[in-house]
Image: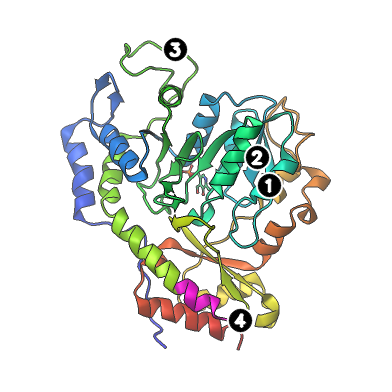
Amino acid sequence: MREEVLFPSWPVWDEKDVEAVSNVVRSGNWWCGAPSERVGENVWEFQKEFSRFQEAKHCIAVANGTVAIETVLLALGVGRGDEVIVSDYTFIASASAVVAVNAVPVFCDIDPETLVLDVDKLDSLITSRTKAVIAVHLGGNPVAMERLCDKASKRGLKVVEDCAHAQGSRYRGKRVGNWGDAGTFSFQASKVLTAGEGGAIICNDDVLAEKIYSVSDCGRKPGEYFYSHFEYGTNYRLPELSAALLRSQLRKLPAQHELRNENARYLADRLNAIDGIRVMKPTEGAEEIGYYIYPIVFEPSKFENITKEGFTKKLNEHAIPTDDCYPPLHGLACFRNVRLRKGIDYSQANWGGEKSDDALFPVVSDIYGRSVQLPHYVLLADREGLDYIARTVERIRY
Ligand SMILES: Cc1ncc(COP(=O)(O)O)c(C=O)c1O
């Protein structure tokens, strides 16, 4: 068995990336300006290029994936006293953005196979205070958006897609982010498209897109005088230097995306053939997956009751990189102890104190305890590397 490190590191960069950033430095145009008074070109061009890649009408670039969600919630009018349903299995940002706008996140358990929000559980969580649902496409695996949007429109709810993991994911013919009212993206260092930090919002509604832009740029309106501010907004702009790097990185993404999808299918065939192993199942209707992470769920009894830590250690000992899984949100200290925003009533939430009980979120609690995940750059390895992963997993039981 090959023992040396087989896996590419991340980020993948070359001289074109260096040149893209250097060109901005040399130009002296270090910020983008506003649509009516443009200074640099990279933010504006990146918005066009990313909306083309995601097949959306509008793209508004912002500082990161967290403020992308916050901006959309503000633009949709979500605020104090509103409830927003969020998957329990995600990074804190999907819920902290809800808290930031003084609304209350309500956590939804996941589907045991696809690991994303279980749409069948939505009905039991909707109350008269529910204003929106945030569909997190964990690991790029799309939430069943057709059913979710159908339910949301019947109940008059807004839909935000958190696509931080899902650049390029396609579900039933449409790229994710185009199903709901808006889709948000992160370009933080570990993401499949990155400039270290960064974010974007896509949207197909002209009026909402203008609002989103306004919230992210000090309440300005495109085409209006720079110092006119029409509503509440703040500075969540993407820096020009980051946009230059993102444009250069975006040119590499389609080939990487295709390879990840090919390799993910190959690895799934190899790993699912091992007794006691199953990988995240693509949602029915998923045609392409962003694969920010590649979750593997194991049956401890088939591996001499190995723990998640033990399983991870075995992979790492064989130079296979892993990422930690997200601890389910309901159990995080900030939610368990209800240490959040002053003056907001969280008593109706389905978490906090005794409600932050794993037994009330049985699927995610079970999966979290017996899963590991591979980072996306593992899926850029060659076939020999993927076979090596499968052989290593198989031998963990011995
Ligand atoms: C699902 C999800 N949503 C939102 C974010 C927030 O993105 P950022 O780190 O760019 O603020 C992340 C970041 O890891 C994420 O994983």
Q: In this view, does 396 lie to the left or right of 367?
A: left
Q: What element carries label 2?
A: strand
User: Which residue has dot 3 on it?
Assistant: 230
Q: In this view, does 386 lie to the left or right of 337?
A: left
Residue 353 at x, y percent in the picture: 81, 44
Farthest residue toward the right?
354
Graded by Cα atoms within 10 Å as few (under 14), some (14 to 19) or many (20 or more), the crowding at tag 1 reads: many
Q: Do the residues labelled 1 and 4 touch (CB within 8 Å)?
A: no
Q: Do the residues labelled 2 and 1 touch (CB within 8 Å)?
A: yes
Comes first in the chain, label 1 or label 4: 1
Confirm or reject: label 2 Cβ below 8 Å from ligand 1.
no
Q: Quadrant of residue 350?
A: top right
Comes first in the chain, label 2 or label 1: 2
CA gap, disc 3 and disc 1: 36 Å
Residue 74 at x, y percent in the picture: 54, 26
Q: Do the residues labelled 2 and 4 touch (CB within 8 Å)?
A: no
Comes first in the chain, label 4 or label 3: 3
268 drawn magenta:
yes
Q: Is residue 271 left or right of residue 2?
A: right
- Residue at the spot 31% in from the left edge and 41% down from the top edge: 52
Q: Which amino acid does label 1 sit on?
A: Cys
User: Which residue has dot 4 on it?
Assistant: 275
- The range drawn in magenta is 267-274
- Image disc number at residue 108: 1
- Residue at the spot 72% in from the left edge and 50% down from the top edge: 331
Q: What element carries label 3?
A: loop
Residue 253 at x, y percent in the picture: 31, 54
Comes first in the chain, label 2 or label 3: 2
User: Which residue has dot 2 on it?
Assistant: 85
